[in-house]
Image (cartoon, rainbow, N blue to C red):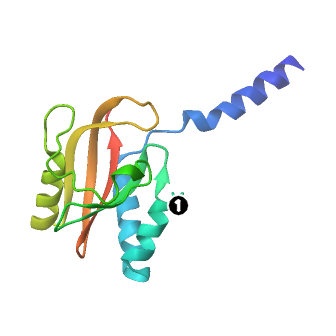
Amino acid sequence: MKTLALLTTAMLALPALAADPTEKDAIAMAEKGAAYIKANGQDAFIKKIAAKDPDYLQGSLYVDVRDIKTGIVLAHPVNPSIVGKDLTDIPDASGKKYRREIIELAAKKGHGWVDYQYKNPTTGKIEPKTTYILRVGEVVLEAGIYKK
């Protein structure tokens, strides 16, 4: 009986041992969002993000949306209090204006990676993060992972 209890406990703990998201996961999530926008429109996608759709919010990996011209956050599943705000020139904990870098990279190349410091929603701590950005029309999709 004791063995069965230990086995059951171990099996219940397995999801907690799932691998951290990778760069491939971030790219895939952003590309999935881009495909959704192309098929259903930007407004429909923003509603999915605001509703915390599990396709676009998986632990510390999620997609948020920014207007490329104004820098205004259009949707954020983890921190909805920043929606509608232009935080372009607000630096991260190390002083880097990473949002400005995101917008510039999206405008010039359409996609790429930006590194910065950000609060991890699963740990509550400021941690190094790298975010894949993907321009879709006049918005930028952002999907990042925390570095270990």
* Quadrant including the C terminus: top left
Residue located at (11% from left, 59% from top): 104
**Nearer to me, 80 or 95:** 80
Q: Amino acid at mark 1?
A: Asp
Residue 119 lies in what quarter of the image?
Answer: top left
**On the rendered structure, is 17 left or right of 102?**
right
Residue 10 position within the rendered picture, expressed as x and y whole percent measured from the top left: 70, 27
**Nearer to me, 34 or 23:** 34
Q: Which residue is mark 1?
A: 53
Q: Secondary structure at mark 1?
A: loop
**On the rendered structure, is 144 left or right of 101?**
right
Around disc 1, counting alpha carbons within 10 Å, would you say few (fewer than 14), some (14 to 19), or many (20 or more)?
A: some
Farthest residue in the top direction?
A: 2
**Nearer to me, 48 or 142:** 48
In this rendering, the answer to whether 140 lies above or below 4 is below
Residue located at (17% from left, 63% from top): 106
Residue located at (13% from left, 44% from top): 97
Residue 143 lies in what quarter of the image?
Answer: bottom left
Looking at the image, how many numbered discs can be counted on the residues?
A: 1
**Nearer to me, 79 or 121:** 79
